[in-house]
Image (cartoon, coloured by chain):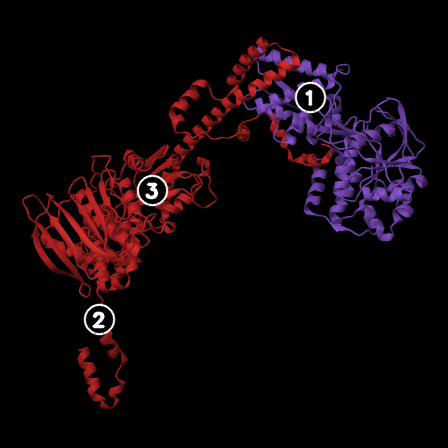
Amino acid sequence: MEKDQSLDSFTGNKKEKSEKPIALELAKKQREISIAEFFEKNRHLLGFDNRRKALLTTVKEAVDNSLDACEEAKILPEIVIEIIDMGNNRYRVCVEDNGPGIVKEQIPNIFAKLLYGSKFHRLKQSRGQQGIGISASVMYGQLTTGRPARIVSKIGPAYPAHQIELRLDTAKNKPMIVTDQEVEWHREHGTRVEIDLEGDYLKGSQSVDEYLMQTAIINPHVTITYQPPTGSQMMFVRVTEELPIEPKEIKPHPYGIELGMLMKMLENTENRTLQSFLTEEFSRVGAGTAKEICENAFLLPSMSPKKVTRENAEKMMEAIKKTKIMNPPTDTISPIGKELLEKGLKKEINAEFYASVSRPPAVYRGNPFVIEAVVAYGGNLPEDKQIDVLRFANRVPLLYQQGACAITKSISTTNWRSYGLRQSEGSLPIGPCIVHVHIASVWVPFTSEAKEAVAHYPEIIKEVKLALQEVGRDLGKYLGKKKRLNLELTKVDYISKYLTHVSDALKEILKLDDGEKSRLEEHLRHVLEVSRSVKKEDLEELQRDYGPKIKRENKDIDDYDDEESDESDSEDDESSDEEGSNEERDE
Amino acid sequence: MMAEETVPDKIKRISNNIYTDIVKEAKPEISMPLRSLQNVTYSDKVGYFELDNKFKSRTLTASTVKTFAQTLKMMALSKTLVETDDIATKRETYYVSKNWGEARFHEQVESDTVMDDIEAMFMVNREQMGFIPEEKGGDIAGKLIVIDKDPETGKDIKIDCTKFGSGAYSIPISVEHLKFETDAKFILAIETAGMFQRLVKHAYFKSANCILISMGGVPTRSVRRFVRRLSDDKKLPVYVFTDGDPYGFLNIYRTFKVGSGNAAHINQYFCVPQAKFFGITTQDIIDYKLPTHPLKEIDVKRIKDGIKNDPFVQHHKQWEKSLIEMVKLKVRAEQQALAQHGLNFVISNYLPDKLKNPKSWLP
């Protein structure tokens, strides 16, 4: 119809041919942009901002996929990573796992089609979510080196290993198979990915090395073998044979739903009534709750979901807010657990004290989540620097955008001074300390698609702070004990240092003989030891528990005086007598 | 009550108490009056800061063992000094401590504090313990003959303080043995050496028949003791002439007249209760239209602290009023500011006016 009309108007006005509506000209240029094309132009959104980050992102996506696959198949993950420097800023990233493998037909879609995967359509705690990652890496490699990605996969001893070289048709977002052959492979099952790409290999924070180390810390059940482009091979060996409990899939909770998603669900549902739609497709919605939502939305429970208009969907959103709905089940999350958290950190970080906590599940916007935190103190950690913050979401280290992250904010707004660290208002504390925070959730809210920072939900910040306070209290207790022990050790020194001077002076004044003097010293030592605030047994216990770890501080005992109630000597400092210094000039 | 007890006796008695306590395995304790403005009262009757009965005590514990050792060491030193009729300056004492190994002092301030503590504990002045200050006292010029002893022969020598020309007689560190002859009418204690020089140069002491003393800032103990003895002995009034600022009022004059918090245990001897304040008063600044400097923040703080905490100011409402007035004017004036009206205005007008008009003084 439209086309006809416009043609009519054309033919009817031959003279004005040159003045045809601009929209028609513009329309020629307007066409569908494929997602692949979009991301080609906006690669920073996916973590390919620069060469260094591109290398990291590629390793990260491949490793995340491998780990997810292994865990889903209940296989203890063994990941082998190799990065080969090919000159001219080109690197080959090889990631190999002992996972279940991928059936041949799926390989092209998984590795060379954006937004393809098993994880987006369900609500379940997993590392990857959107199914963009690995395909984006393949595409990035293709853009920067022109080379296809090579995938080898085998699904069992009885099956052949397939090696497929893939490209991604960026215009159509479709995989293109370059070569496809059966090969000999040493593994019974597993997958190997090789991607050539332009990158930069550097050490330090935000490096591949750092990422793998943190991955090993937060996944104590994983063994990682890593050959960096320069230097010797690194091994991160698992400290537990226990696989994480598999997280359960859950239906969305009404509180977490957004209008667009609700409309989509209404459209796609197979349920015939609103009532059954609500009870079947959401968690924690029973018959009563469904009825209440419908009432609050002024809609009939028997209405067909397909007939719900946009306006009505909005009413439903309002109604959901008004309706009191039970929190979603929280057993769907698989936290790491207190002991394993600590074990994981211990194996990579040499500190003198560790404390950890795994909080009970909480809920933000209908999504259950669990916060876990570990703190390590002392040992080889540097003294006078801001503490190291390690952030993890669903067992994945977050290396970028620390400042924008809710976890960082929670740490810097927690008062660490009361736990014995130095801290200026609103910034990260200072001290030989590492703090890890892990958020596990079916849906971790990130601030961007690159999944680098956790969004600032008040519920999340609150939980993180509670976790930090718990480990902080443990840390504070430890530091208090340590300080007391140090003080005690100093006092023992102190006593023997000055004891003889007391007896010397008394000997001189009272003309004591040597026998009297040594008896006096004995008594004196006794008097002083008794006067100490900590009893001998406690001191021994402290020394047993912490002694070997404690670096003796070479402090004078006077430094401790303000903490002890040191008789009435403090009255000397009274400010009202401040003229004392210049009052008596002859002093 | 312990008047007859000598310093070595006191040292022995206290040391013995400590010894007995230790042998009994009790915690020895030494106590001394708290040396602070918090622990003094001003009474008009005696005319100086009297020590209250707040004590601080130091129990021998692990954390006080160092100070304890140092105190005992210094007591031992004092005993030796007195018994051998020797003296040690405060600086020398600090160096002697360098022989004490770990118990040595790191700064002279530390040894001075321990010395002050012992002084307070015994309620004697440090000269009696054999310790003397490093600096000499002030300068004297005027109608006074000081009778001292020749250090070699031990014979009396008379020193005529009018005969120093443009110089002056120096007050010795110890003044207890001095005797005086004078027919002067008053003593004028002056803050700055400059003003003292001007008055000496023009022989003001002759025209006014008086004794001039240069204090050079806050008067030392020997200056205070000297003036006290001289004034008591010869029944001479004492006038104080300082800059018109909080330092002149509260540090110099107040310490001169009634003593200090820090030396409360010896104020009895080292104060001059009969002193009166000549100027520069706040009223002088107005009356003589003196050139001024603005009060600094620290000056204002000093005044407020004085009004709030100084028992002397609290007792004398006139002083309080004068201080408040100064804060309101927000200015201070130096003695030399009188030169605005001519270099010798101070001799020709200011001092004669003051002498004639006791109402212009402050108590």
Q: Are marks 2 and 1 in contact (CB under 8 Å)?
A: no
Q: Residue extending furthest bottom? A: A15
Can the viewer see residue A327? no
- Which chain does the purple colour mark? B
Of discs 2 and 1, which sits in the foreground?
Answer: 1
Residue type highlighted by circle 2: Arg
The mark that comes first in sequence, 2 or 3, is 2
Q: Which mark is residue A31?
A: 2
Chain A: drawing colour: red
Q: Which mark is residue B121?
A: 1
* Residue for badge 3: A437
Check the picture and name the quadrant holding the N terminus of chain A: bottom left
Query: Which residue is at 40% across, 42% downward?
Result: A387
- The quadrant holding residue B256 is top right
Q: Nearer the viewer, residue A405 or A197?
A: A197
On the rendered structure, is A24 left or right of B132?
left
Neighbor class of circle 1 (other Cα within 10 Å; few <14, some 14-19, many 20+) is many
Between the residue at mark 1 and the residue at mark 3, the CA separation in whole angstroms equals 59 Å
Picture mark count: 3
